[in-house]
Image (spheres, coloured by chain):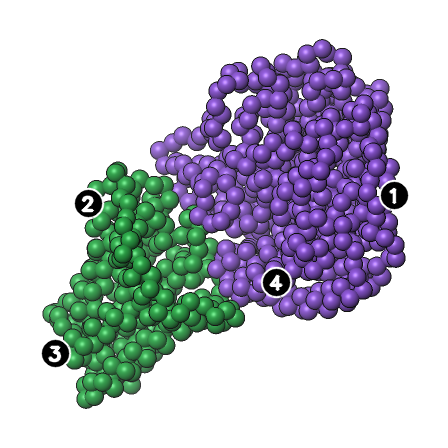
Chain colours: A purple, B green
Amino acid sequence: MTAGVATHNGRALALKDVPFLEPSQFRGWLVNGVRDKGRRIASYFGVAGGPESGPAADGIGLVAVLADDANGRLSVARASCDGASFASLFPEIAQAHLFEREIAEQYGVTFEGHPWLKPVRYHHSYRPGHDAWGRPSDAAIPPGVMDFFRVEGDEVHEVAVGPVHAGVIEPGHFRFQCHGEQVFHLEIALGYQHRGVERALVGGPTKRTLPYMETVAGDTTIGHALAYSHAVEALAGTQVSARAHAIRGIALELERLANHVGDLGALAGDVAYLPTAAYCGRLRGDFLNMTAEICGSRFGRGLLRPGGVGFDLLPAQVEDLRSRVAVARREVTEAVELLWDTPSVRERFDHTGTVTPEDAESVGLVGPAARACGIQRDVRHDFPAGIYRFVHLPVMTAHHGDVNSRAYVRWLEVQQSISFILDQLDGVPAGGPGAAAGALKPDSLVVSLTEGWRGEICHVAMTDAAGRFSRYKITDPSFHNWIGLALALRDGQISDFPLCNKSFNLSYCGHDL
Amino acid sequence: MVSSITNLAAVLVLAPFLLGVINKTKALVAGRTGPPLLQVYFDLAKLLRKGFVVSSTTTWVFLAGPVLSVVAPVVAALLLPLGGRPALLSFTGDMILFVGVFALARFFVASAAMDTGSPFEGMGAAREVTFSALAEPALLFGMLALTRMSGSLTLTGMFDLGASAAWQKASASIILILASWFILLLAENARVPFDDPTTHLELTMIHEVMVLDHAGPAFGFIVYGAALKLTVFAALLVMLVIPSRPDSGALALATFVSGLVGVGVVVGLVESSMARLRLVRVPQLLVTATLLAGFAVVLVLR
């Protein structure tokens, strides 16, 4: 057997059905899938200890999930690794780059042939005594301390920004190699927000698991809670009511609306275009307040839970939401259309921070950043789950891969999400908000994908013989997309960095976990 | 003489108010209440009371920047016939000093920025010096045209009664100078579309990024100096538009001050209606300003 087992989004597999491939077969399966069949790596991670790690006694297991967007299929396979080194896939497939760095850091495995094997989050290995860089287990690992790529030359200068920034944003370090105003290379060092989420999830689900999920990335509370709920429901075999699916869909789209509208305002603010910046800032708050109207939390904390939703929609709330969304639709349209009608704004957005479709495919971008390059990639369309199995949403794309395209995709999605919410409010299905999910199946694996507002959120849950999580892997869209920001800056102007950064608006804590 | 001093004092006192007018205009257009008109005075009072940290890598140059950034516009204001009163300091060729003091201040502010050794401030200094080299000709060409029109080699002479007569003789030139100097005002004072005075993003700033390391009273000097510089440039525009009236001192001053406020409102409206330029486009607009002033010279020479 030389291929992974085929599965669908949110379908539980028995672990024994996930094949162990020989390392060479595993590599061949991934390289063939990504390079020749147009698939991409949705997740790739290590598993330590126990029977999950495979035949090698002191080794670790490697699990990879390949996503076939065009056919809506996922395939999963495993390989065992001796725990010391593994041949790198990076020379063949670029999107393996960060996944391999992550596995190297977490399990102390060296990837042979990886030209850029640096730490990702600056923590000690999960396996004491094994460290990919040979650091002693009692040594302090300060974040951001590594060998940065350097360009040498008379007129080349280096600009270091962060981890403390001028605005109230999360910490991250950016190192630019510049020639005057032109950027040759940008290297991004994150990890300052590392909290150890994945390790804390092992042994779950417990009372704490859901709050952890809701705070993986605070602005994607609904997205991560939904991916987690789908994973648990698949493992527990829980049937979710149509009503709960509809409320979850409304919540996910409200989250998308709040963030997309806020981003459009922030993009206007970055080019000092006041009208849109001022109005979108307020409108973002209006959308957050709609979520608060449903569940009492502007970010949707406590709204979703495995098995259903924590808050039902009363008829009066439906009416109220409908009128508020209609008002917001009119106001958002007025505020955002100004952007496309103002030449000075278009002059800044057009051809700034361009990512080519080839680069976007090769590094595996997801979400609006990928769709802005003309790539048809949207979990709601390709791997529909929950309400999206019943409501088909076309994928919104733009074609230049620049700041303008990323902004315009957001605007298209804003309009789509508003229509979706109004449609759902017109006919919220009858039924209850759902019951609690039961016990999880032992020795199983599930891949759960959700299209958060930033892009594909991938959760992979594996259970042990007692039905507890033996490994819970979270891949936030930011994990795929930070490299896209670095590519967007190549040969760009350093003064355009804040604008490019805002057009991606990636999560630091979602990446750092 | 007394009314010249009164007018100068009015400019020195009202300078922060002009920034308040711009901020208020922007806020009202954006549908916000905005900061009080006197906010900049409150900020200055706060900054002057604060202590400040000076990096150990810096030298006296670091403090010369803030001092010169106040001294330069004060000297410039001394040379101008504010509100139709003769300048307190006037001699043949004083417009060269007018341009020169701003260049001197810029030299020291840019040097103070380099003095900290911060890559951001070096970047800001490079941008500021590049762009001001392109902005200076616009100011000088405008002065040249006015000199030719008025036949005077002093600023007082240029903006004196002759200017109102010049409106009849060479209104096209004056309109060109007005356009050129308005662009110059936006560029020299780090306003949109050249710079964004409200941004906190150090990589995009021009003027603000040079003064990141200044704090407390030193930063207060810079804020006040910037307000005064803006007022001096606004005064240039006002004096071109409103012919001086030697007869009624108080009325002339009132007209002059309302002219300044008018410029503030226009700047606020510009900032509310357009995005700032891509940095590589800034030289193009500055060259346009120079060309406009150049055409003004051509028109008066014919």
Same chain assignment for discs 1 and 2: no
SS label for mark 2: helix
Name the quadrant of the N terminus of chain B.
bottom left
To which residue does mark 2 refer? B60
To which residue does mark 4 refer? A283
Q: Residue at 20% x, 73% y: name it.
A: B8
Direction top: furthest residue: A57
Estimate how packed mark 4 is, as few (under 14), some (14 to 19) or many (20 or more) residues with alpha carbons within 10 Å: many
Callouts 1 and 4 close, C-beta under 8 Å: no
Select label 1 or label 2 by which is in front: 1
Select label 1 or label 3 by which is in front: 1
Callouts 2 and 3 close, C-beta under 8 Å: no
Select label 3 or label 4 by which is in front: 4
Q: Residue at 63% x, 62% y: name it.
A: A286
- Cα separation, mark 1 vs mark 2, equals 74 Å
- Cα separation, mark 1 vs mark 3, equals 90 Å
Q: Quadrant of residue B4?
A: bottom left
The label shown at residue B1 is: 3
Tell me the chain of label 2.
B
Q: Which amino acid does label 1 sit on?
A: Gln
SS label for mark 3: loop
Q: Position of residue B157 (x, y in %)?
A: 17, 77
SS label for mark 1: loop
Q: Where is residue A492 in the image (x, y as percent from the top left)?
A: 50, 44
Q: In which quarter of the image is residue B176?
A: bottom left
